Amino acid sequence: MVFLLIWVNLKAHYKYNHYICAHKTTLFIMKLIAESSSTRTEWVLVEGNQLIQRVYTEGLNPFFQTRKEISRCIRLELPPSFFTKKIDQVFFYGAGCSSYEKKNIIGASLTAQFKVSVQVESDLLAAARGLFLDESGIACILSTGSNSCFYDGQIVIKNVKPGGYILGDEGSAAALGKMFLSDVLKGISPHDISSELFDKFRITTNDVMDSIYNRPFPSRFLATISYFLVNYLENEYIHDLTIRNFRDFFNRSVLQYDYKNYPLRFMGTMAESFSTVLHETASEYGVTIERIEDTPMDGLIAYHEKVDGLV
């Protein structure tokens, strides 16, 4: 009887201490999660399941920036608190992070700054995880660039290559900006909107050519122009131009997936800013867009809570 009581007490003691240790582990795991387009990077510090801090810096893309340039941006643009807190894990999702070589550029920069284990994945996987967590569906990005995939709840199964702002990126902000500026240069766009563009940005046609062909990050410049057009969506020309841009995306990307049997969700500033026209375009194809998010970050926080066993 005495042996039995001792065994029961030891078992209860072990369970209590195991719970306390697990509880403390949950409270003190600090994660840094970042999601980056070519224009903007969103960074969040998460402790357990609590959001500690959220900040934004310029976009990081290993196709256009060296490791040194990326490290400089991280060090100078993130607040000091990000370097004084004890971070246990870093998850970075970014545009251009599709190959081992490009992931290594970002990963090496982050490891040098934070001295912890770093996992680097594509912005496409960020969209899929953020929009669907562990469910299957078609995830689409419409931001500075564009991309899409079929996600089975764990990994990306199929991806129609985006092609970048020269060979593809249909539906994106850069693509719309390119379409509009091409018409501006050829005198096709409405004169009043073209004049407003030049006045607002204090640029000339020569500046446009210089920004596209001689200056860094031309896709950012093109995207900035497209967001100027949000204020003119009631204009027939701008409305039709936007519809054409989205049709290109549906025809060349969405229709290549099993879109009739799986949910379709969108992520990105372009998708959110032009959501009315995006829904209108989808209806032409008999498609319902389930959800549009500006950023996948809230979904990514939920995803990492779930997969890390912290919920």
Image (cartoon, helix red, strand yellow):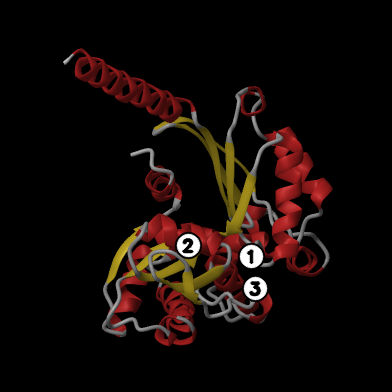
Residue at the spot x=67%, y=27% of the render?
83
Q: Determine the image quadrant of residue 292.
A: bottom left
Query: Mark 3: which amino acid?
Result: Tyr
As drawn, the residue found furthest toward the left would be 1
Query: Mark 2: which amino acid?
Result: Met
Q: In this rendering, would 226 be left or right of 38?
A: left
Labelled pair 1, 2 in contact (Cβ < 8 Å): no
Query: Of callouts 2 and 3, which one flags the residue occurring earlier in the amino acid sequence?
Result: 3
Q: In this rendering, would 218 be left or right of 277?
A: right
Viewer-nearest of discs 1 and 2:
2
Report the disc number at residue 222.
Answer: 1
Viewer-nearest of discs 3 and 1:
3
Total numbered labels placed on residues in the image = 3
Q: Which residue is mark 2?
A: 270
Mark pair 3, 1: CA separation:
9 Å
Residue 274 visible in image: no
Residue at the spot x=68%, y=67% of the render?
99
Report the disc number at residue 165.
Answer: 3
Residue 65 is situated, as x and y percent measured from the top left of the image, at: 78, 55
Q: Determine the image quadrant of residue 27.
A: top left
SS at badge 1: helix
The quarter in which the C terminus is drawn is top left
Mark pair 2, 3: CA separation:
14 Å
Q: Crowdedness of circle 3 by 10 Å Cα count: few (<14), some, many (20+)?
A: some
